[in-house]
Image (cartoon, rainbow, N blue to C red):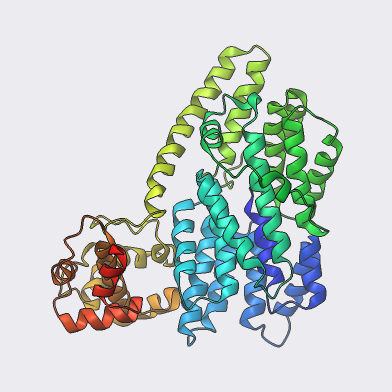
Amino acid sequence: MHTHLYFAVAALTASPALSPSQVRLAWQGEFHALERQLAARMDADVPAGPDTQRAYADMQWLFGRYEEAEQLHRDALKALADERDYFRVLSCRNAAWQALFLQRNGAALACFRRVVEDERAQPALQREAWLGLALVMFQLGHLEAAWDCAERVEAMAGEAAEGVWPALAAVLQQELLAQVRWRGAEGLVDHVFWRHLVTELRLPADLEPSLSSPVDGGALARHGAFQQHLRTLAEGGQHGLAALHDTVQWAAGLGMPEYARFLRLDLAVAALAGGAPDVARQALESFGEPGVSMPRGGHWLLDYLFCQAELPRRQGRRTEADAHYRRYCLLAMKRTREQAMTMNTLVPLPARREQVAAADDISARLVGKYRRAYAYLVEHLDQPDLSVKEVAAHIGVTERALQLAMRSSIGISPTQLIRRLRMERIHSELLSEGSSKNVLAIAAKWGVRHRSTLANAYRREFNESPTDTIMRSAA
């Protein structure tokens, strides 16, 4: 499952900056034409509004221009500095997609979760975040969680003002099911990372007929049909091969190079599953050598190394095959460890003092030395006298510089951030089964000494008292 097309349809068709004709361009996959129109508005004498800036920045992600996209999104957020809730959610949304495009899955997961859990987030941004969660869960190999998120997208699709969401939800579920089926083919028994995932997955038996209806028109329909043809190919049928090649050529013309390359890689893996090594070899040759700019965190590299091992093995070149397969196995073990680590984000856990800032949503939105400031802040949350002045001094900036940097990046001040993080850790411990439930002792552990401070800050954050949390968790 590849991020680019889902994001393009979800984000661009919902943009208030696009006219109905431009929404149709996004729906049909005419991204070059749409970018030209948005670029003209960006270059016009009248300054473009934040919605146009955001839509144009989103398009840079599609074309692999990640640095340009990040700067454009920062510029768009500056106009929203007074709308604190919207600023906060939107900055988290931007960090989530940026991380997912770069396949920094831990950061993407944390940021998307922050959006869906934010009661002040707009429904459109929450729908988009559930879509992002489905994609990142698949990348991480959490297939049941990916399916749960896809069902949330389906449930929310009917509430969307944009009519594309039911179709998007349908293609998302169809592709997830198709990927599970063709990756579980007997011809891929040595693709061990995916093999154990798909064989252990349990989905309802009646999914096949309920998800069989094709989606009418648009780029998503073509993408969904591609996945169904892959499944046929993996089962040994080649009558859809011409359609597969046509879709790969179509994707190459969209201007999204990574999307087209990843489709070729899917084609190679499915061809190996279906006993068509010549088709796989041709697709892999078209894929080319992974460049230094290719993101390294996703499942695509596992697929690539598997193909590199499997093709020579089927030709009897055992030494070459074994060398590639050793690299594949080492990476598969690493991915499995990462998968186990991210399980911690799928269920509530007791607060831990060693919480690391590197992969959470706040760190992902900060830049440069301000990430060090955040890491210091997290490390010293338990100190009651922790101050903004102390955090600023740690990285050699003034208090005002730190305040401005955090407000411009995450939409809240350092003081508000300290309060929120402390309340979140207290909340997490109150929900923990092993916690003593001594509210004041837990609060003191995280640097909160006064009952009134705790009561006011906790209610502001969770709209309930600590006692309410304990009673709710015990129910």
Tell me if residue 254 can be seen: no
Q: Is residue 417 above or below residue 355?
A: below
Could one spot residue 4 in this view of the protein? yes
The residue depicted at 25 percent of the width and 62 percent of the height is: 429
In the rendering, at what x and y percent does residue 108 appear?
49, 57
Tag count in the figure? 0
Residue ID at (68%, 42%): 178
248, 458: nearer the viewer:
458
Q: Nearer the viewer, residue 20 or 79?
A: 20
In the rendered image, residue 314, in percent from the top left (x then y), is placed at 67, 16
Would you identify the image quadrant in which residue 219 lies? bottom right
Residue lying farthest front? 475
Which residue is found at the position 81% from the left and 69% from the top? 24
* Up-down relation of residue 124 to residue 222 (above or below): below
Residue 425 vs 355, above or below: the answer is below
- In this picture, residue 428 sits left or right of residue 346: left
Say whether residue 15 is left or right of residue 409: right
Quarter of the picture containing the C terminus is bottom left
Q: Position of residue 442 (x, y in %)?
A: 17, 67
- Residue 110 x %, y %: 44, 60
The answer to which image quadrant residue 167 occupies is bottom right
Q: Is residue 368 left or right of residue 230?
A: left
